[in-house]
Image (cartoon, rainbow, N blue to C red):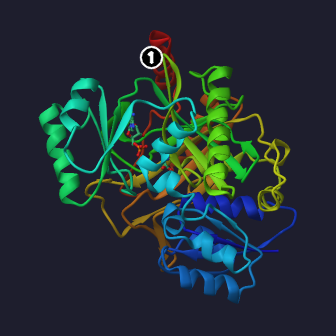
Amino acid sequence: MKILVIGSGAREHAIARAFKRSPQNPNLFCFASSNNPGIKELSSDYIVGSMTDTKAILDFAKKNIIDFVFIGPEAPLSVGVADVLWKNNIPCIGPKQSLAQLETSKSFTRDLTTKYNIPGSPKYKNFSSLTGVKEFLDELGELYVIKADGLMGGKGVKVAGDHLHSHEEALTYCQELLDAKSNFVIEEKLIGQEFSLMSFCDGTHLAHMPAVQDHKRAYDNDEGPNTGGMGTYSDADHKLPFLTENDIKQAQGINQNTCDALRTEFGEGYIGILYGGFMVTKDGVKLIEYNARLGDPEAMNVLSILESDFVELCQAIINGNLNQDHAKFSNQATVCKYAVPEGYPNNPVKNQKIDISEVINKNQLYFASVDEREGGLYEMGSRAIAVVGIGNTIFEAEQIAESEISKIKGPLFHRKDIGTTELIQKRINIMNNLR
Ligand code: AMP
Ligand code: GLY
């Protein structure tokens, strides 16, 4: 069995490890965007190239007679790498370009869920000029969000109260987007708690993963600039402490409805991961956005406790006979924390040596933006290493993650509050006050 993983962050390190745990003992190949010593060690062949170089990816897959491909990041999905692989009879986990619009176009997703009456949509409108913007902002009052309609690496979204403080500022931002030739969506600002619910999808059937909560802000207490995600946790019962059974059912239902809508819309199924970004509000679960891939860091939480054979799970996705039994997760809690360079995300230090020798369980370290040189590890400027703690409770998992991450030496920092009882109680209180 030969499997090609595309991508080379901590998410792909977790994907590679999950494949390597399979009793089928596959040979792994990696088409990477940079050198990742963790993935390299697990791979039979490893090359670095552009994530959007479809031809190079296809050539590498053909050369190695790959059985199937797993696409990690969104960039290859956005340029149709999946289309080209399938056309060459190479099965691929990750949707084709048109179906990946679920992530690459905010307006596509809002229009789709509206057309198919999928619950959980906030009020929204699409714009390609300033016409009607003022009126719609007046209708929404202080509760609005403006989103550039394209892949912006998380930087195209501005939220009233956080980034925009008046309708004037909002209009200025809309004009900036138009100047940059970007259409945009304005939507109602949702109030509540965010969570991620990801599902494996074979085009028709879903197998759901445990719910996870990410932390986007750089510093403790959700302060500081937005990042790719500083850390995440999941609970032993696969819910989250501020969610009810019914909240989870609603989110899973929205993922199933979206899978069905995509099949109807395109006449072919969505094959890959449906990653719903949800907000639980006083009026139930609402959809913030979709991603067409595993979350980073969410992948480290869920894949660390995946009990099933990941190769078999992917084969079921490809064969179209997926069911929940293919994706069994242990009843343990997880906490993942990222060690990031000092100054991250705006002015990160780079090319600095870091030392992981004191970390006890290196199997729970996931390498991201680090390189190996002259026998040492160097941080390269983005999120460097993720550490996962696994325990019977979130509290236990947090203690392990915190103790291990504090053993990584170098000019790095991490969020000490992710997964702590104090922060989680705060989340619970917010939801209790809202409901
Ligand atoms: P997105 O790229 O759509 O996930 O947006 C990035 C972040 O903006 C989300 O993780 C939320 O924190 C916030 N956000 C996006 N849409 C909304 C919304 N309708 N209401 C409140 N916050 C939102
Ligand atoms: N955890 C955020 C993301 O993967 O987009």
Mark 1 lies on residue: 430
The answer to whether residue 267 is left or right of residue 432 is: right
Q: Residues within 10 Å of mark 1 (few under 14, many from 20)?
A: some
Choose between 301 and 70: the one closer to the eye. Answer: 70
Which image quadrant for residue 268?
bottom right
The answer to whether residue 327 is left or right of residue 267 is: right
- Rendered-image quadrant of the N terminus: bottom right
| Ligand 1 location (quadrant) | top left
Residue 408: x and y in percent read 49, 54
Residue 67: x and y in percent read 77, 75
Choose between 195 and 344: the one closer to the eye. Answer: 195
Which image quadrant for residue 211?
top right
Q: Secondary structure at mark 1?
A: helix
Kindly identify the residue that appears in the image at 32 percent across and 53 percent down: 345
Vertical placement of residue 309 versus 189, above or below: below
Residue 435: x and y in percent read 50, 11
Amino acid marked by disc 1: Ile
Choose between 68 and 176: the one closer to the eye. Answer: 176
Vertical placement of residue 308 versus 193, above or below: below
